[in-house]
Image (tube, rainbow, N blue to C red):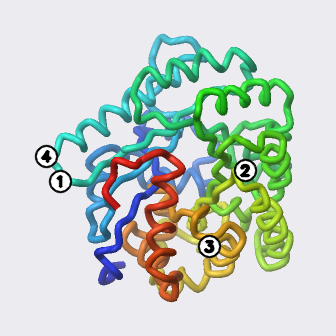
Amino acid sequence: MTEAILEPELPIIDPHHHLWDLRPMMGAFPEPHHPFIASVARSPYYTFNELHADATCGHNVIGTVFMECGAFYRSGASDALKVVGEVEYVNGVAAQSASGLYGNLRLCAGIVGHADLRLGDGAREVLEALMRVTPRFKGIRHAAAWDADPDVLGPPFHAPDGLYHDATFRAGFRHLGELGLTFDAWLLEPQLGDVIALARAFPDQTIVLDHCGTPLGMGSYHGRLHERFETWRSAIHELAKSPNVSVKLGGLAMSFAGMPDHGPEAGLSSEVLAAMWRPYIETCIEAFGPDRAMFESNYPVDKWGASYAVLWNAFKRLTLGASADEKAALYAGTAARVYGLGDLTI
């Protein structure tokens, strides 16, 4: 679906996208028809050219933040340090964008990598190695998504139940604050209590909740979004009481959420998507405020439900009544502050 771009001059920092080449892996998944794997299979190769084409589709994207996804790990390195390869690769993409040959857009101006915090104090060596790669490195994500229903997540995800409560994980986690690094949390709506507890245990650590806390609409949760909305809403407001936490507004086009429940690129208009997502986006903004909320594309995963242009049109429809200052924060300012992107012109 093609649409005219809404508010094309509004500056955007997209604070959450991936880069990968998963083509060699696609045949290894035991459940190729799982909706998440099906959505990834539509974009198994997503690197500079694909990202640049999306980011220059007509919206005024001025910069982006890369989010770890387990791609381009360093061959031959130890299990602990192979993650450095991902940041090295993405820093090359950032340098390509910063060359000026492709315009003023700064792709991957911030980089969020991965380190296994279950190494405890041993995680510090990995974090310091990541920091040595580039000042663009801002922090890590260690996902904790888990559900007792194996049909919810599918085979790519193997986080243990209760990861954010684990004592060894927390021993590694404390090094983030000491090094001035951010932490992105990805987990599912029934697990929101885990990140609430983590935020309270480390009140000085910058934490970003990904994907509105990932409401669930698949597997045993199919058809239960309305039933579980108040549970999700209550947890979001409780989490927002911790001032060290911000939230990313997006991820709702993933197959996990079922909004839409068919894809990829479901062909729905931005008006339909905005109506579908409004209760979740508005709840998050109400709870966290514009200064602790940021819109994200989560591309190419959210390609399941919308093209890049339609996705941002849907977000803009949800903020038609917002003030100029509120829009400045939601679309770029919050991301710039949280990830230390002060050199981008907003």
> Which one is in front, 1 or 288?
288
> What element does badge 4 sit on?
loop
Whether residue 113 is visible here, answered yes or no, is yes
Give the distance between the C-alpha atoms of the residues marked 2 and 1, in whole angstroms.
36 Å
Front of the two marks 1 and 3 = 1
Q: Amino acid at mark 4?
A: Leu
Q: Amino acid at mark 2?
A: Leu
Q: Which mark is residue 103?
A: 1
The residue singled out by tag 4 in the image is: 101
Give the distance between the C-alpha atoms of the residues marked 4 and 2, in whole angstroms.
38 Å
Whole-percent x and y of residue 319?
Answer: 51, 81
Give the distance between the C-alpha atoms of the residues marked 1 and 3, in whole angstroms.
34 Å
Whether label 3 touches label 4, CB < 8 Å: no
Q: Amino acid at mark 3?
A: Met
The residue singled out by tag 3 in the image is: 259
How crowded is the residue under tag 2: few (<14 C-alpha within 10 Å), some, or many (20+)?
A: many
Q: Which quarter of the rendering shows the N terminus?
A: bottom left
Q: Amino acid at mark 1?
A: Gly
Among the two numbered marks 3 and 4 on one chain, the one whose residue lies closer to the N terminus: 4
Give the distance between the C-alpha atoms of the residues marked 4 and 1, in whole angstroms.
6 Å
The residue singled out by tag 2 in the image is: 187
> Which one is in front, 323 or 92?
323
Among the two numbered marks 4 and 2 on one chain, the one whose residue lies closer to the N terminus: 4
Q: Which mark is residue 194?
A: none
Q: Quadrant of residue 240?
A: bottom right
> What element does badge 1 sit on?
loop
